[in-house]
Image: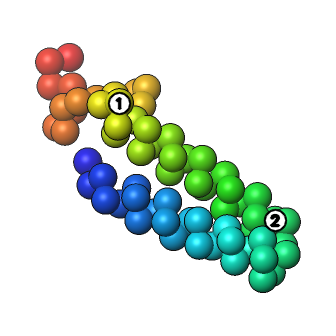
Amino acid sequence: MIPPAFWFFSLAGGTVLLLYAIFSLKDPVITVGQAAGLCIYARNIWFLHKGRRPPGVSGDPVGDAAT
């Protein structure tokens, strides 16, 4: 499992890169790419906050041993 701090650092780093792309580079390709990444990071933090797992992710770190 990925530590929750990973998503918070990813969100912070992605925000800095997005601001750099908007104000310094003025490159629409990098801007859209960073914005898409921020949506993913925010979604994963929301899953952490709600205590849910994304679809298809098992709660068992070993896998489905019962099947």
Residue drawn at x 84%, y 73% is: 27
- Give the x, y percent position of residue 41: 50, 51
- Give the x, y percent position of residue 38: 59, 54
Does dot 1 land on a helix, a strand or a loop?
helix
- The residue closer to the viewer here, 41 or 19, is 19
Does dot 2 land on a helix, a strand or a loop?
helix
Tell me, for residue 29, which label it has, or none: 2
28 horizontally vs 56: left or right: right
Q: Is residue 26 above or below residue 8?
A: below
User: Can you identify the residue that label 1 sits on?
Assistant: 50
Pointer 1 with pointer 2, Cβ within 8 A: no
Q: Amino acid at mark 2?
A: Val
Residue drawn at x 44%, y 43% is: 44
Whether residue 48 is visible: yes
Residue drawn at x 20%, y 17% is: 67
Residue drawn at x 76%, y 64% is: 31
Q: How many other residues sit within 10 Å of disc 2, few (<14), some (14-19) or many (≥20)?
A: few
| Outermost top residue | 67
Quarter of the image for residue 56 reads top left
Whether residue 53 is visible: no
Q: Is residue 2 above or below residue 63?
A: below
- Give the x, y percent position of residue 50: 35, 30
Quarter of the image for residue 65 reads top left
Q: Nearer the viewer, mark 1 or mark 2?
A: 1
26 horizontally vs 48: left or right: right
